[in-house]
Image (spheres, coloured by chain):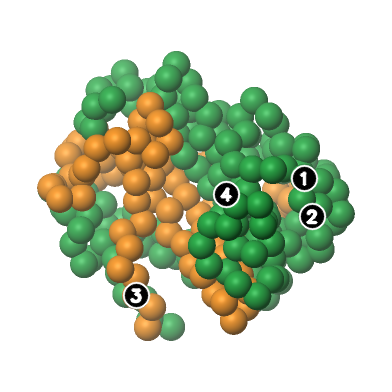
Amino acid sequence: MIDSDVAFTHPVGMAVHDVGDYKQGPLQPGLVFALDPQMWIPDEQLYIRVEDTVVVTSDGRRVAHQGMPPLELEAIESVMRHNA
Amino acid sequence: MRLIKSPREIELMRRAGRLTARGLVEGRSDDANRASSNLNWLPRQIFCSFAVVRGDPVIDRLSPGAPTSGTRNYYRNDQLLQSGDLVLMDYAPDVNGYTSDIGRMWPVDGSYSPVQGELYGFVVEYQKILLKTIRPSMHVGENRFRPRLSR
């Protein structure tokens, strides 16, 4: 079981870590924030993170840069092979 | 600096996001596959920050100037890549004053080691779960925004 006390998010706007507190109230359409889950694995001496910027819409959410860059492991390795 | 962005602001951030995505893919040049190269191939105009993450004893919090001891955002840009490294590319370019924050981790060797791949895949799955959870009216402070994952 893995748990975290951290909400992996911060506001994005005119600054990459923008001002504003949205964690106390309900999310509203037009809110933009980064989603960046992170994992520290001391035993393996590893740190892993991915990060995307998300826009809250009236019916859910949209990744601000849909489809790019690749996220999945296989897609990243494919890009590496393609550019090698 | 409004918390709720207008459609115009969101469009600027989408443009910034597209630039960020391009930078992340194009920045991963041939040199990224070669151990012992440095990181100067990164496209400077969109460069924000990156980190080299590899096998040192302490992977913990930000440690400026010590990129191999768990630095998450490493700015000196003079660290040599080594076989087995993962490079965290964390980009956030501006477009007309607005930005978009994207991060990916590239394996210097072109493929992840089994352990790296398993853990990277785990974080990606976690990210996808978080994304599916987001909707208007929810609170990010809710426990469901911090899903517990069993393995």
Is residue B121 in view?
no
x, y percentage for residue B9?
A: 33, 22
Mark toward the viewer: 4 or 3: 4
Q: Residue at x 34, y 70 (%)?
A: A4
Q: Which residue is drawn at 38% across and 27% down?
A: A14
User: Quick one: label 4 or label 1, which is nearer the N terminus?
Assistant: 4
The residue where tag 3 is placed is A3
Q: Which residue is drawn at 72% across and 42% down?
A: B77
Query: How far apart are the alpha carbons under marks 4 and 1?
Result: 13 Å
Is residue B45 in view?
yes
Specify whether disc 2 shares its chain with disc 4: yes
Q: Which amino acid does label 1 sit on?
A: Asp
Mark toward the viewer: 2 or 1: 1
Query: How far apart are the alpha carbons under marks 3 and 1?
Result: 35 Å
Q: Which mark is residue A51?
A: none
B50 left or right, relative to A6: right
Chain B shade in the render: green
How crowded pointer 1 is (Cα within 10 Å; few <14, some 14-19, many 20+) is rated as: few
Q: Hey, which quadrant is residue A32 in on the image?
A: top left
Query: How far apart are the alpha carbons under marks 3 and 2?
Result: 32 Å
Q: Residue at x 36, y 31 (%)?
A: A13
The residue where tag 2 is placed is B81
Q: Is residue B1 above or below residue A76?
A: above
Query: How far apart are the alpha carbons under marks 4 and 3?
Result: 24 Å
Q: Which chain carries label 3?
A: A
In the image shown, does A58 or B50 lie closer to the viewer? B50
Tag 2 secondary structure: loop
Mark toward the viewer: 2 or 4: 4
Query: How far apart are the alpha carbons under marks 2 and 4?
Result: 15 Å
How crowded pointer 4 is (Cα within 10 Å; few <14, some 14-19, many 20+) is rated as: many
